[in-house]
Amino acid sequence: MTNLKLDYQQTSSAKVSIFKVLGNSPVPWLFPLAMILVFVFLYPIVDMIRLSFTNANLISAEYDYTLSSYLTLFTSSGFSRMILITLFFVFFSVLFQMLLGCLIALLIDQGVKRGLTGTVMVRTSVLSAWAIPGVIIGIIWSMLYNESQIGVINYMLHSFFGWSLPFLSDPNVALISVTLANIWRGTAFSMIMIYAGLQTLPRDIIEAAMIDGANAIKRLVYVVIPTLAPLLLINLIIITVDTFNTFDMVMALTGGGPGQSTEVIALSIYNRIFREFELGQGAATAVVLLAINTLMTIIYFHYMEKKQVVA
Amino acid sequence: MSKHHKERWINSGIYLAYVFVLLFFLFPIFWVLSLSLKSVQELFATPLIWFSTDPQFANYLHVFQNTNIVNYLYNSAKIVLLTVLFTLLVAIPAAYAFSRFNFKYKKISLFAVIMFQMISPVVIAIPLYRFFVQVDLINTHASLILVYVAIQLPFSTWFLKGFFDTIPQAIDEAAIVDGCTRLQTLLKVILPVSVPGIVSTSILVGVQSWSQFVIPFILLDNNELYPVSVGLVNLQSTIDAITTHYLAAASMLAILPVMLVFILLQRFIVGALTSGAVKG
């Protein structure tokens, strides 16, 4: 045994002495990560902020530094409309993803505790919506919402109620349609986060509440939700950021139309730059999105810190 | 009402709710499958046909022969595999360092890493597009994979760090006493016991990269190089009502690989998502 150990020590020290020196500092371990993140994230972010102070466009290479992008942006009615559309989309997506996610998580949790069959099937089918690429979700829902004869949702509405809806052709309805598809897409994530949280709930607290005579609703409101509050907050922040950043699903479902009625902020950045070639204005819009991302991150850290203190 | 009776009512209520949940989440997928197997007549039939009595598997053959789908799927598979590989190569050492070293600014660096997770890919894609055009690396899978890897790194590093944190330090110390270098400790001691964590990370990175759209949409301008997400949007623009069944078939083909991976490995995925959730 001692011999073996000695042998091992000799060969290793001869072979990798240089690694040993380097290996005891964290720098070489973190260097590749840092290089990639600086190049792919930090440099583009700085470049985007720089471009937002120019009148650059995609057609000519020359540009001047100016504040005109921001001035045009903040004074245009299109911008405030776009922000309102984005806020509507984010608010209702997040609200219903949280509510449905919570409800389904509780249903599965209760099902498992009661030994019901089919809990795995419910979980898998909800999660499969999460695994499908966003663009394909957009394509799938564009088929469901189709306003010609082949649209199945309108067929059902018509046969049950006798009326149908202009899902994607009416500006107001289109925004609701896009939001609904996004709720379908995002509920799985909240569901699984909350489900995971429910598994970590200490049994004794629940039992104590039961002995005190608290019914299911009271236990949920006074015990389960407060205990899960940090997790719920973190989930809220993650899905809010994700929804603000949504591009793929809306792109495939409406492309931002009709008109610009479903042009959420990420799509607006793309359209300004690649459809109208207004790099400066697109960059200024991107800086607005970056500001939102940063704000959410600060809130996130704030609660992460708090959670660590508690734990 | 007896307790037993009440329990049965509650159970029935839960089952009823399950039916609604299943309908809401499975119906869209069922409908695409149904569309993909219809003939043109069935597509437009009134009353609507829920599922073809004579499924047209030829629709899939048509998609294979007349679109670039095979190429798209191949590109996606290649990009995803390489992304997973390179993400692990960079994230594992970084996660090890965050888990095992103590250094100045460690907390700030960790927060800096997770901060990039919040940045919208649209924002970074445009400056990168301009940069890759300048250095003539636009329209290559290599530059694309670099960006994919970067997007996956914050999450992977955090996730693996969390996993390494659960492995007792005593194991490392024993290995170092035995004469292992840090690198040997990682390769021979930590990695073998981290297989579940690495598998979970790979699956999550794989599923996310398969879905990635904005980056290839902006960085690629060549039909031959498109992954399946961009390929399908491209296909969608050439399709009208009368060829919806082909678009549906192509969508099914694009979903199928992730669905298969998903159903086969769902225990790992749920494990991965939930352990991530619990750690915040």
Image: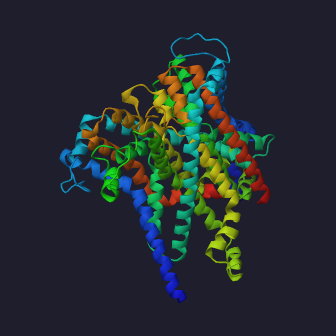
- Residue A255 against residue A299 in the figure, above or below: above
- Tell me residue B158's x, y (percent): 65, 47
Which quarter shows the C terminus of chain A?
bottom right
- Residue B169 against residue B243 in the figure, above or below: below
Which quarter shows the N terminus of chain A?
bottom right
- Tell me residue B90's x, y (percent): 61, 39
Q: Nearer the viewer, residue A183 or B56?
A: A183
- Tell me residue A2's x, y (percent): 72, 58
Q: Nearer the viewer, residue A54 or A7?
A: A54
Say whether residue B103 is visible: yes
The quadrant where residue A253 appears? top left
* Residue for point 35% across, 33% down: B237
Residue at the extreme right: B104
Q: Nearer the viewer, residue A123 or B226?
A: A123
Residue A128 shown left or right of residue B91 in the figure: left
Residue at the extreme bottom: B2
* Residue for point 35% across, 36% down: B236
